[in-house]
Image (tube, rainbow, N blue to C red):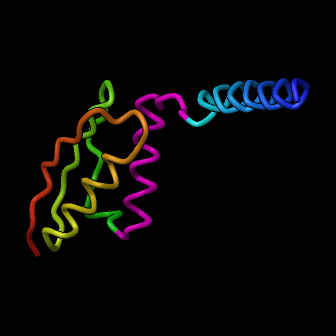
Amino acid sequence: MKTSASMMALALVLSLAVSCSNLNKMTPAPLDNKAIQAEVEKNLAADGLTGVVHVSEVHEGVVTLTGTVHSSGDRQRAYDDAAKVNGVKRVVNELKVGS
């Protein structure tokens, strides 16, 4: 009985140690400004917003979007594409909706 309890305690300690060591691997480091811009542009291209939305500036994690999109949905998608990039602190959405 004592051996069984010791084995269970050891298994618990080992599983906690393994799960804690994985925490660092799950949180990537923020990207630098150039990498943030490239990632935002990649996301915009995936949504077909290349050519109408421009990442006019990235400074200290603040992304500024400019251009004209066809709908408010496109404007929101562009914002979301920028906001979801690791390291982006704020998105300045200067996109205009027009034809």
Does residue 37 belong to the magenta stretch?
yes
Image quadrant in which the N terminus is located: top right
Say which residue appears at 37% left-offset and 59% top-offset.
44
How far from the left and from the top, in percent, is residue 61? 33, 30
Residue nearest the viewer, comparing 94 with 28: 28
Say which residue appears at 86% left-offset and 29% top-offset.
7
How far from the left and from the top, in percent, is residue 73? 19, 70
Does residue 60 belong to the magenta stretch?
no
Region rendered in magenta: 27-48
Main secondary structure of the magenta stretch: helix
Q: Quadrant of residue 70?
A: bottom left
Vertically, is 77 above or below 58? Answer: below
Image quadrant in which the C terminus is located: bottom left
Does 68 sit left or right of 3 as displayed? left
Residue nearest the viewer, comparing 14 with 83: 14
Does 10 sit left or right of 97 as displayed? right
Vertically, is 89 above or below 50? Answer: above
